[in-house]
Amino acid sequence: MSATILFARTRFYPLIAIALVLFITIGFSRSFYLRFLSDLPPMRTVMQLHGLVFTAWLALFVAQTQLIAAHRVDLHRRLGILGVFLSLLVVATSAAAMFVAAATPRINQLGLTSPQASILPVVAITQFVILMAAGVTLRRRASLHKRFMLLALISVLGPPTARLIGLLAMREYFLVIQMSVVAVFVTICLVYDWRKNRVVHPVFAIGGVVLILLWPARYAVARSEMWQPIGEWIAEVGKHLVP
């Protein structure tokens, strides 16, 4: 086996994890990480808490991929318990942030009201939970575990991508850009699998396609009469969480 192929096999997941986390960090740089340098108003406490918990989860994700590359499976497994705990906190704080955002009157980049736009985090949280649960459940089957975990990270690209779209003033291309960002990272995973195994793994193929197609689906649901009362209920609950 050549040194190049061996390097690709051991470094792909650490490298793509770093690339994804860098993308997310850049997306949230103005609204969270470097907010003190902008003229944006102070963040609500629940949003700050969510950002801190999510950042801790991202850092642990990168560390876990590095541990596997260094063949420290023992430490990777011990830290997995912390990963599950942080994942639960990510879900809890994401849900709280969703309620608060739904109660804040505004029109988002898709032209949706806050109650309508609540479908976006609902879908994001749901897909994250499903992918994380699959990854944890299949943790003893490495080929499945690592792919589900990576898709879980790809599934949270929506919010940072939305921030970048706003900064670049490209709101008219919101859906296309959101789908394209997910498609690019999924394609990288598919190409890696093909070059390594000469076959596309169904977790990446099926899971990736679902993540992409969920964008136009959630937009359609957001404008439907079915979602209206659900969105309004989420906004009403959120009003009790806003000081």
Image: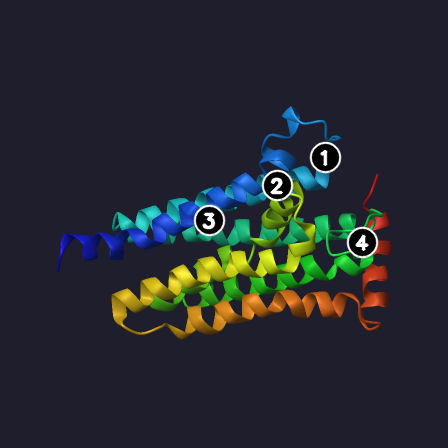
Residue annotated with mark 4: 114
**Residue 20 marker:** 3
Q: Position of residue 57 (x, y in %)?
A: 51, 46
* Sequence-first tag of 1 and 2: 1
Q: Position of residue 195 (x, y in %)?
A: 27, 65
Q: Dot 4: what SS?
A: helix
Task: Name the residue: 69% across, 66% down.
Answer: 218
* Sequence-first tag of 2 and 4: 2
Task: Name the residue: 62% across, 54% down.
Answer: 91
* Sequence-first tag of 4 and 1: 1
Task: Name the residue: 65% across, 36% down.
Answer: 31
Say which quadrant the N terminus sits in: bottom left
Residue type, numbered disc 1: Met
Q: Is residue 68 above or below residue 199?
A: above
Residue 167 appears in the picture as rendered: yes
Say which quadrant the C terminus sits in: top right
The answer to whether the residue labelled 4 contacts the one labelled 1, judged by CB atoms less than 8 Å apart, is no
Residue annotated with mark 2: 51
The answer to whether the residue labelled 3 contacts the one labelled 2, judged by CB atoms less than 8 Å apart, is no
